[in-house]
Amino acid sequence: MNEQKKRKALGIKIVGLLLVLVWLYPFYLIVINSFKTKSEIFKNTLNIPEQFTLENYPVAFEKLDFFKSAMNSVLITAVSLFVIVICTSMAAYALSRNKSKLSDRLYFVIAIGLLIPFQAIMIPLVSSFGKANMLNRPGLVIMYLGLASSMAIFLYFGALRGIPQSLDEAATIDGASRFQIYWHIILPLLKPTTVTVIVLNSIWFWNDYLLPSLVINKEGMYTIPLKMFYFFGQYSKQWHLALAALFIAIIPIIILYVFLQKYIIKGISDGAVK
C-alpha cells in the first residue's frame, strides 16, 4: 500500500512538473527574445541569445510612455477593483442573509452571467454607453463592474455560507446597524475571498485590450495594452521592442501575485466549496 502511495505521489509530481514547464515556456520565450535584436529573433527564436542586448528596454520604455500609460492602467484597475469589491460583497451579503425565493432567484440569475461571453454583448453594450455619453473612464469602470459581478458574487456568496449568522445576531443585540455588521465583522472575515477577487480581476483589467480600445481609445488615456499596439505597424512588426515592453508590463502583476498567492487558493475554495 505504501509503495502504491509513493508511486502515485511521484506520478502527481511528474505531471505537476510537466504542467509547470508548459506554463513557463511562453514566459521563457518572452524573456530570452526581449534580449535579442530583431534579426536574431527571426533567425533563432527558441535559443538563448548569442549576444545579450539591453537596448530594447529603454527604447520600449520610452515608446510605451510607461509612466503615463501605467498610471492610466493603475487608475482604471484600482478604481474598478474598489467598486467591485464593495458592491459585490454587499450584494452577496444581502443575498446570503435574506432567505427567500426572490433571493434564490436573483442569485441564480447572477450565476447565469458566468455563462455569457463578453463578445456576445460587446456591440449593444458599447452602443448603449455611447448613446449615454459614457465612453470614458467612468463608463469603463461601470462596464467592468457589470462584467465582473457574477464571478465575484459567486465567490463571496459561497464564502458567506461558512460565516454563521449568529455573529450578525450578536452584533445586532449589541446595537450595531446592518452596515456596521457588514463593514466591521463580515468584510474582514471575507479577506481571502476579497484577495482572490482582486488578483483575478486585476490580471484581467491590467492586460485587457479589447474593451479599453472600444471605450477610451483617446490620446492621453491609453493604457499599457493600448500603447503596445503601436509596436505592430501595417508593414513592420517590432517584436524585439514588443517583447521587452511585454516583460515590463507583466512585472507588476507578477509581484502582486507573489505577495497575495497564499490567499488565492483559500479564497477560491471558500467561495466554491462551502
Image: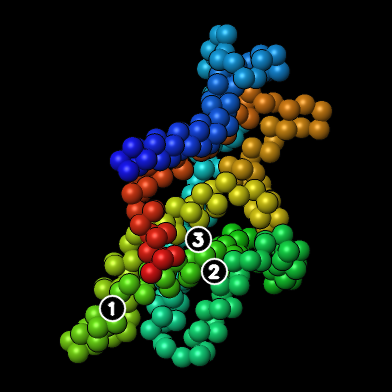
Query: What's the distance in space between the residues labelled 2 and 1, CA to CA?
Result: 23 Å
The residue lying at 44 percent from left, 52 percent from top is 199
Q: What element carries label 1?
A: loop
The numbered dot on residue 150 is 2
Q: Is mark 2 on a helix, strand or loop?
A: helix
The residue that disc 3 covers is 80
**Quick one: label 3 or label 2, which is nearer the N terminus?**
3
The residue that disc 1 covers is 164
The residue lying at 39 percent from left, 78 percent from top is 93
Q: Nearer the viewer, mark 1 or mark 3?
A: 1
Q: Residues within 10 Å of mark 3 (few under 14, many from 20)?
A: many
Task: Judge whether 221 appears above or below 158 on screen.
Answer: above
Apparent side of residue 154 relative to residue 232 in the rendered image (left or right): left
Q: On the image, which quarter does residue 172 sit in?
A: bottom left
Quadrant containing the N terminus is: top left
Pinpoint residue 116: horizontal percent, then vertical percent.
66, 66
